[in-house]
Amino acid sequence: MKIANKKVTAERLVKDALAKAKHFADYNIFTYLNEEGALKRAREIDARIARGEKVGRLAGVPYALKDNFLSPEGETTASAHILQGFTAPITATAVKKLEDEGAIMIGRTNLDAFAHGSSTENSYFGPTLNAYDRERVAGGSSGGSAVAVALDIVEFATGTDTGGSIRQPASFNGVYGLKPTYGCVSRYGVVAMASSTDCIGFFTKTPEDMDLLMSVASGRDPKDLTTLDDYYNVSSNAESDDSRAFATTGAIDEASPVTTGASEEANEASDSCVRIGIIKEFDNDSVDKEIRNALKHKCELLKSKGHEIVELEMPALKYALAAYYIIVPAEVASNLSRYDGVRYGFRSENSEDLDALYSNTRDEGFMPENKRRIMIGNFVLSSGFYDAYFLKAAKARTLIVKEYEKAFKQCDYILTPVAPNPAFKLGEKVNDPVAMYLEDVMSVPLNLAGVPGLTIPAGKTKTGLPIGLQLVGPRRSDKSLIEFSKELQEDD
Amino acid sequence: MDIKREDILHLADLSNFAVSEGEAESLQKDLQSIIEYISQLDELDTADVEPTYQVFEMENVWREDEILPQEADREALLALTVEAKDNQIKVPKVL
């Protein structure tokens, strides 16, 4: 990515990004443009560069912030009516880390309200359009962030992924999108959806940029006690020699080590041959033929580089979506009970008493999909249904976790489609919640298991829509996963 | 299972929503199809399987019980509400 220096100023980078954001205004990517704030920060960075002071690793890099990250710049709405008027009095840890390195937020991006959805059509501000076809959805929930990167408005954008909300829009718009290991990046200051599966990640144009962002944003945070120790940067010491070797040779020699000693979770095979698992249950007619062909093509590419393809049977994954749409709504119902119109955000007018204020605010402030999820959550948790639904789903989750553990004894990484289809038409699924949920069938298992997944661009359909595949690794394999994705790169 | 109109009203009550006539009807249809879908878990054998509620690797994270400096002070927090009076948040009558 372009970093500001004496020749290219931060002000120039920011002005270009803002101009592009305005040029593409009709894609409905941004809920807020941070013009004044971004230019002010850019000038500060340029002044430091001019004085010869040390600047950060992301100095002057314009980025887009998904509108469910809290920071005092602009209202944080999560694209929900109920949060309108809310200017955050705190800054999310991920935002602080990026900005400490000099990154500059030029705008907040559109999402399905509270990240509930797979198309960005559930936004209070209307849908974001796909970067490659304006009649199609951006994917979701992080649709605005994916399109901001795909249209080259910004160098990178933040996202959240509870069940595919980074990986699916990345695949619909032809960019990289990482859902890290659960607990790798602090969730402090990010609007909570489902606390046991929410992950913070990024959209980028290259694996190198993804690695840089992860080295900045990952790590333990005393404000989020579910963050893991700083493993990402610890493993980087062992791996940096290899990545430098790749950068200098430009191409990867078949015999050269492609994963490193640091990814000991996965590696029993020799260094040069990596075992890639393909999930048998995902190879069926419900997945678009061109996506299946793209997967086969990448498998041939990997074989030609001396890697081994292993067929996996993971029968429990068939139940992941049902388990997900029990566990996540239950957590949603709990997390969204805080929105009542009293302390912040939107408040319904003319309520007679306090109870009416709560129920009117929630009725007017939530989108239909928010309501469906909250009600399903309260259904699966309610007396008489808890055992049959919530407890059953928690047990199914155990089987899914175990299935990944078993799979990663047979292979180093898994390669699968991200979604069953490329970007679909606007309005096509918006009135059929179950059809929309089925978009997530191959992305949610990772969230239930807490393992990382990286969407990689994998060509286009005959009609020119991007195809994405996801590379999945064991927990804590984030860095080697990003590194290995370079093996799958080809010229278009 | 069949989701009836009174189930929707009960769930709306648990969820603290005031739902209108038309909304109750569409919620009934949508929740029916979602519950049919998630009910397919019935066919999965989970005998002797322990539940998983989180995939974080630790049990407890201990810290000292001390008050740390906060980013937002009382004034900043009160400024977020629609109506404040005498350092308190003002709401309609409770009873």
Image (cartoon, coloured by chain):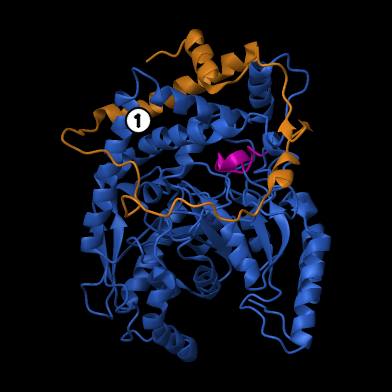
Chain colours: A blue, B orange
Q: What is the total number of numbered labels drawn onto the structure image?
A: 1
Work out whether residue A272 can be spotted.
Answer: yes
Is A482 magenta? The answer is no
Q: Chain of mark 1?
A: A
Q: What amino acid is labelled 1 in the image?
A: Phe
- Residue A128 placement, left or right of A205: right
Q: Can you identify the residue that label 1 sits on?
A: A390
Q: Quadrant of the C terminus of chain A?
A: bottom right
Would you say A414 lies left or right of A187 here?
left
User: What predominant SS class does the magenta segment belong to?
Assistant: loop
Q: Position of residue A110 (x, y in %)?
A: 67, 48
Label 1 SS: helix
The part of the image, by quadrant, that contains residue A16 is bottom right
Q: Is residue A244 above or below residue A38?
A: below
Q: Who's the residue at 40% across and 36% down the image?
A: A327
- In the displayed orientation, state which residue is furthest to the left: B48
Q: Nearer the viewer, residue B66 or A376?
A: B66
Q: Quadrant of residue B78?
A: top right
Residue A321, horizontal then vertical, whole percent: 39, 39
What residue is rendered at 39% in x and 69% in y? A231
- For this view, does A98 lie left or right of residue B52? right
Magenta-colored span = A112-123
Which quadrant of the figure contains the N terminus of chain A? bottom right
Front residue of this view, candidates B94 and A415: B94
User: Which of A2/A272 is in front?
Assistant: A2
